[in-house]
Amino acid sequence: MARADDARAAAEDSLEDYAFRYVPRSFRRWSALSIGGTALGSIAFLADFSIGASIGLQHGTANAALGILLASVIIFAVGMPVAFYAARYNLDLDLIARGSGFGYYGSIITTVIFAGFTCIFFALEGAIMAQGLQAATGIPLAAGYLVSTVVVIPIVIFGMRALERLQFWTTPLWLALALLPLIWIVFTQPDTVTDFLGFPGADGGTVRFSAIVASASVCFALTPQLAEQIDYIRIMPPRIASNRRSWWASFLFSGPGWVLFSGTKQLIGVFLAVYLVTKVDPTIGDKAVEPVKQFLGMYQSLLPDWIALCLALILIVVAQVKINVTNAYSGSLAWSNVYTRVRKRYPGRAVFVAFNLAIALALMLMDVFSLISFVLSLYANVVMAWLVTISADIAINKYLLKLSPLFPEFRRGMLHNWNPVGLTSVGLASLLSLACFAGLFGPALRPFSVLIAIGVTLVVTPLMALLTRGRYYLRRQSDGIPSPILDSEGNPSGQRLRCHVTGYMFERPDMMVSAERGPHGEIQFISSLALTLDRSGRYVLPPEPGELPGAGIRK
């Protein structure tokens, strides 16, 4: 039986985040430009600089730059359809994945992959902050790990409104601290640009395709940042005639376009590492990949040591807080989504904030930062298998083959629990790419493991849809409500209906007809939230006979 009290508590607690719900129009009161600016504020992470530095020192500037370009182009292409669905239909990546090849329970697998990403990147950013605190104050790294974990809790608990204010007010400071000294060095020391362009790296600097792909493989691990961008852009206002230009501009730059800024930061990371090695401290070695060393060395070459130390610490703390509130926020949404569907209970998002942070702290204490290139290269194989599958299902199966319904269905009862299309694609692509990464196909193919993951998913996703004829996407063609789910401009409808379990009003895209009639035999409506928490199944409509492959709303 559905727990009405639990459902009401979940509805109230999720008013700031909509953890496993469609984001209603009544909440989406920010302008497109405001949402875009907030989303871009979350890409202030410093791991980009470290990733760029690590591949630059290993493969040289030319190979690193081409690898960053290759990864950026592919990530943009993969992210475009997924981000569009999030902004257009106001859903997070888990809800999109349900109707894009995975099924109601099948998308749990993809959500766990993403939740793992938030833990890993929180740990990497937290380790960078701890390094900064150690350099500035001398406190042990372990204590710095704890400080960097605890400091984000108050902001994360308060949800989207607190995050919007934080990102808006801190972005100008972050940009000034990161870019102004760099610009000064480039214009006053032009030989640094020459050193940067000609830096050979440990491999000797010869441009080789294998080195380019190996560089790109590390960068691909950043792709799940798209899911964190989606947690912001799903709150985009409806796209109408009066805001069409600002809507598209905000979407492109803060959605798939996040990778343009990320790639630029990676190139800056290469430049800073080369600057340290050639101009500041030729004996610095692998420490040149640490953003603390990079920015401290840059500031010290321009300013007195005490000012340099203060500025480096401010930059690192601001950047770490900006990204790790997003990591903790998005991770808590992902874990709560998984737990609620599996257990049919909602203990509150604060529990999952603590859970996410505990895992991240454990990774920091295990010194995951020292293995950054290996960890990210390994993780990239599964990450690309997951995201390319969703993107391929949207672009190919929905729009080209028309075997997957165009509307991204996410409600329990409308979907099959499991869809072999996405599950087979992710499973096979992950298995083959990880085997390649482990060297089972020979050392010559090892750098190409991520490209294998991408290639396999692009083939298997549409192939499985064709083999299954799209029959595992929709369990029902109709949710029983006579009014349309989209308005005349293709935006989700703002019509409000009352959920008979919670007693609350929800907007049309979140609602279905309940299988349980009212006391006088009347039709009742139920929210997707109440259906998620229903253990009995008494409210779930039965499957419709004779459903057509890929049938559904095609607006």
Image: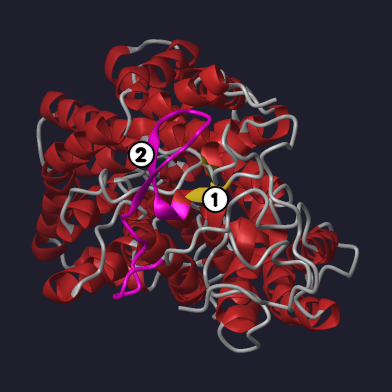
The kind of secondary structure element at disc 1 is strand
Q: Nearer the viewer, residue 544 or 280?
A: 544
**Magenta stretch containing residue 419, yes or no?**
no
User: Where is residue 512 drawn, in percent x and y?
Assistant: 54, 50
Q: Which residue is mark 2?
A: 323
Q: Amino acid at mark 1?
A: Met
The disc, 2 or 1, on the residue closer to the chain's N-terminal end is 2
Farthest bottom residue? 400
Label 2 or label 1, whichever lies nearer to me, is 1
In the displayed structure image, the side of residue 5 where residue 544 appears, left or right:
right
Instruction: Identify which residue, 522 or 382, lies in the foreground.
Output: 522
Image quarter in which the N terminus is found: top right
Residue 356 seen in render: yes
Q: Amino acid at mark 2?
A: Ile
- Location of residue 514 in the rendering, given as x and y in whole percent from the top left corner: 60, 44
Would residue 234 appear left or right of 194 to someone viewing this image? right
With respect to residue 285, does 344 lie above or below? above
Q: Residue at x 62, y 31 (%)?
A: 533
Element at label 2? helix
Q: Counting other residues with Cα less than 10 Å from the Cα at mark 2, is it few (<14), some (14-19), or many (20 or more)?
A: many
Which residue is at a point 69% across and 79% down the rendered structure image?
458
Prevailing secondary structure of the magenta residues: loop
**Image location (x, y in percent) of residue 173:** 12, 40
Residues 81 and 253: in front is 81
Which residues fall within the magenta stretch?
Answer: 486-509
The residue tagged 1 is: 512
> Which residue is drawn at the image coordinates 10% and 37% (left, top)?
303
- The answer to if 490 sits in the magenta stretch is yes
